[in-house]
Image (cartoon, helix red, strand yellow):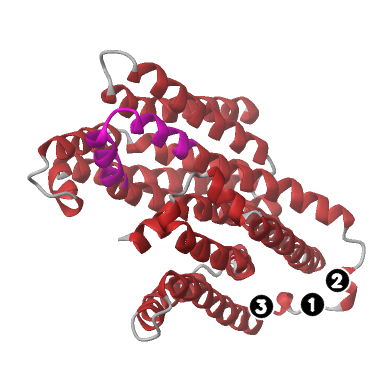
Amino acid sequence: AQSLAAVGSTSIIIYFVFCFINGFTGGFGICLGQRCGAKDEAGMRKSVAVSTLLSIAFTVFLTLICCLLAHQILIWMQIPSDISGEAYDFMFIVLLGTGATVFYNLISNMLRALGDSKTPLYFLVFSSILNIFLDLLFIVPFRMGVGGAAWATILSQLLSAILSLVVGLKNFPVLHLHREDFHDLKASAVLHLKTGFPMGFQMSVMCIGQLAMQAVVNGLGTAAVAGYTAASKADQLSVLVNNAMMTAISNYVAQNYGANQPDRIKKGIRSAGLTSAVFCIVISVLVCAFAAPLMGIFIDPAQTEIIAAGVQYLRIEGACYIGIGVLFLLYGYYRAVNQPGMSVILTIASLGTRVALAYLLSATPLGVTGIWLSVPIGWALADAIGIGYYLKKRR
């Protein structure tokens, strides 16, 4: 139980770092996708070179900062003393292996930008299975405890990154860099940073917003906390699939933006919108209809108050999944057309509205229902801003 608590107590910090890495390297992928669409081989090579150099520098900086502040982070988070030792071990090892996470995300985003979305998928599945195997190996016979779980995560990601790189080098000659590809990189580096940092910031802001929402829910009692925690596990199905759609539309639009094919961009947006709408409607119906059985996966059916809170959350959020589907497509589109700042604005509008309304409505007779309602209202406001700006720019 203490080991589980130690890992759980630091997971939000690790998630925060990983979110920034995912967004940061995703921005690099968009820059590469634009050059790929323009069939600019020299530009593609420069993009790969710049992405590699910036990722190395970012890895060194982030690893040093995170590892040096590891003890202080535990103090800031007020981790109980009886689990602080294991919490430190797990967090320090995972953050020490930040390079493996950056490496894997970078090569995966590069391959997607070049049109290969299957290789990252295959090796992600491989990485997940290997992670489970190494967890069992390091924790049970080797008795490495939470440190073993951390090393399993790092090693599985690193091996998957290496294998992805080997396949990428075989299939895409543009990944074979030469000395001249590292010359005159200043303009390209600025472009990559302008794209990557806002995306990393956006992903981090989303994480901060989740922390703020959790803080509001924490003030409403154990039943609300448990119901929210369990329901959000089921809720992640919609979030993750829509996040995948966002990645797909980002790469598609980036390639066609680079190729100066506005008609294909419009067709892609319509196709992605239709696909996302169908998925969101289907998952909305299923979640609303089976909210109670979904809660039963995580919570003992005898805990009726917790089940009721979670079911209410799922039915309110589930009925409005179309809102998050549209929002994630807008994120992907604005990233791909060199307007990452607009994605940040939409994130702040969505999360800012959600957190503000959660605090305000939780103090009214609505109570916990007000917190649940704040989420789709935030989605709707951000959707209105994003669609309105798109229509204005198109005119």
User: In the displayed structure, does residue 202 sit left or right of residue 238?
Assistant: right
Mark 2 or 3, nearer chain start: 3
Find residue 204 and report its horizontal and vertical position in percent.
Answer: 57, 44
Which residue was labeled with disc 3? 172
Q: Residue at x 54, y 80 (%)?
A: 159
Q: CA distance from mark 2 to mark 3?
A: 16 Å
Q: Examine the image and state in which quarter residue 214 appears.
A: top left
Considering the numbered disc 3 on the image, is that residue within a helix, a strand or a loop?
A: loop
User: Label 1 crowding class (10 Å Cα cut-off): few <14, some 14-19, many 20+?
Assistant: few
Out of 14 and 197, give the one closest to the viewer: 14
Out of 128 and 342, give the one closest to the viewer: 128
Mark 3: which amino acid? Phe
Mark 1 or 3, nearer chain start: 3
Residue 327 appears in the rendering: yes
Q: Quadrant of the C terminus?
A: top right
User: In the displayed structure, does residue 214 sit left or right of residue 51?
Assistant: left
Considering the numbered disc 2 on the image, is that residue within a helix, a strand or a loop?
A: helix
Q: CA distance from mark 1 to mark 3?
A: 11 Å
Mark 2: which amino acid? Asp
92 is within the stretch colored magenta? no
Find residue 21 and report its horizontal and vertical position in percent.
Answer: 61, 56
| 229 w.r.t. 120: above or below | above
Q: Which residues are magenta?
A: 209-232
Name, please, the residue furthest toward the top: 364
223 is within the stretch colored magenta? yes
Residue 392, which numbered label? none
Which residue was labeled with disc 2? 181
| 104 w.r.t. 71: above or below | below
Q: Are marks 1 and 2 in contact (CB under 8 Å)?
A: yes
